[in-house]
């Protein structure tokens, strides 16, 4: 079976669920992973759309990342900038460079001006919560429509309980355009995890989780080197009475998720 996958570093990382399956089951499946570390949903969906057009796969898996993430193009090739923690934010092409906001914004304060200035200015003068959410919902619908038109089976899942903070409350109820795209999405095609800390009965994806919540509930933690909160690091924190994963899922979490969850999707799609 030919499979394409996309997402942020939760899918791109060397030890991710996608790369684990790509190596372990290479004799059974051709897995093409086009995930981008630090990438937002616009970039992730654009990557998987191109991969579908170029490879005509049997199955596609899209991991949704942070709604607040965005990317910009600068008409300069920036290939000599490095950072221990955020070199993932700079992706040089032939005649231009993608600049990715990644999952946090603190690093921008110390970034080289030709990298930090565009990203900071966009966030200061152009960033809109409504627009970020609108792009995400619209592009998810486009991805679903593409797969359905090409008769490609697919699955969508979250990196973590992402939509609650963006959708719950007035934002969705008071914006007709957002509500239209939210309602147009086929939520039956998603893997939405019923996290122990979530409240049942909420519509669609709002209270549902992703690989991070699944990992915590199954005894896994985040990568210890990502935990800058606890001493010693433990890979999780209690917040609002709920255990939350810190950082990226551990290697053990990725492997268990691949075997116990993703392989069932692949079997069902076969």
Image: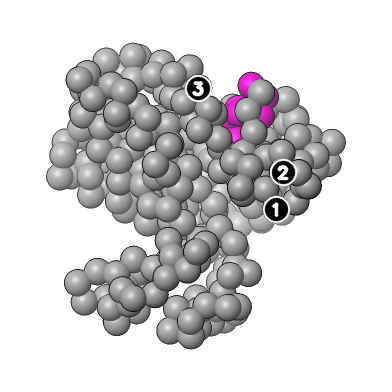
Label 3 packing within 10 angstroms: few (<14), some (14-19), many (20+):
some
Q: How far apart are marks 3 and 1 (CA)?
A: 25 Å
Looking at the rendering, which quadrant does residue 258 occupy? top left
Q: How far apart are marks 2 and 1 (CA)?
A: 7 Å
Q: Disc 2 on helix, strand or loop?
A: loop
Looking at the image, the residue that sits furthest to the front is 232
| The label number, if any, that marks residue 233 in the structure image | 2
Label 2 packing within 10 angstroms: few (<14), some (14-19), many (20+):
some
Q: Which of marks 3 and 1 is nearer the N terminus?
A: 1
Tag nearer the camera, 3 or 2: 2
Mark 2–mark 1 CB contact (< 8 Å): yes
Pick the front one: 43 or 27: 27
Q: Which residue is drawn at 64% across and 52% down?
A: 166
- Start-end of magenta stretch: 208-218
On the image, the x and y values in percent for residue 87 come to 43, 65
Pick the front one: 113 or 49: 113
Name the main secondary structure of what is drawn in magenta: helix
Query: Which residue is under mark 3?
Result: 256
The C terminus lies in which quarter of the figure?
A: top left
Q: In this view, does 209 lie to the left or right of 135?
A: right
Question: Is residue 192 visible in the rendered structure shown here?
Answer: no
On the image, the x and y values in percent for residue 96 come to 27, 76
Query: Which residue is under mark 1?
Result: 228
Mark 3–mark 1 CB contact (< 8 Å): no
């Amino acid at each position: 079976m030919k499979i394409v996958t996309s997402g942020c570093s939760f899918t791109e990382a060397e030890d991710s669920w996608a790369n684990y399956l790509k190596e372990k089951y290479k004799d059974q499946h051709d897995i093409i992973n086009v995930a981008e570390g630090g990438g937002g949903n616009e970039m992730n969906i654009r990557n998987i759309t191109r991969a579908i057009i170029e490879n005509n796969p049997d199955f596609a898996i899209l991991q949704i990342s942070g709604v607040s993430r965005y990317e910009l193009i600068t008409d300069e090739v920036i290939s000599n900038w490095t950072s221990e923690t955020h070199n993932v934010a700079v992706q040089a092409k032939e005649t231009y460079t993608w600049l990715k906001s990644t999952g946090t914004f603190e690093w921008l304060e110390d970034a080289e001006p030709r990298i930090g200035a565009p990203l900071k200015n966009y966030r200061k003068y152009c960033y809109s919560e409504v627009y970020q959410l609108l792009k995400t919902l619209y592009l998810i619908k486009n991805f679903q429509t593409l797969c359905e038109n090409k008769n490609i089976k697919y699955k969508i899942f979250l990196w973590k309980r992402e939509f609650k903070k963006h959708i719950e409350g007035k934002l969705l109820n008071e914006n007709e355009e957002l509500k239209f795209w939210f309602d147009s999405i086929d939520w039956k095609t998603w893997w939405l995890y019923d996290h122990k800390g979530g409240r049942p009965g909420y519509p669609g994806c709002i209270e549902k989780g992703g690989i991070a919540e699944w990992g915590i509930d199954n005894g896994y933690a985040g990568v210890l080197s990502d935990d800058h909160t606890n001493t010693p690091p433990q890979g999780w924190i209690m917040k609002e009475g709920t255990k939350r994963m810190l950082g990226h899922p551990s290697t053990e979490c990725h492997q268990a998720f691949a075997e116990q969850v993703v392989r069932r999707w692949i079997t069902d799609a076969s």
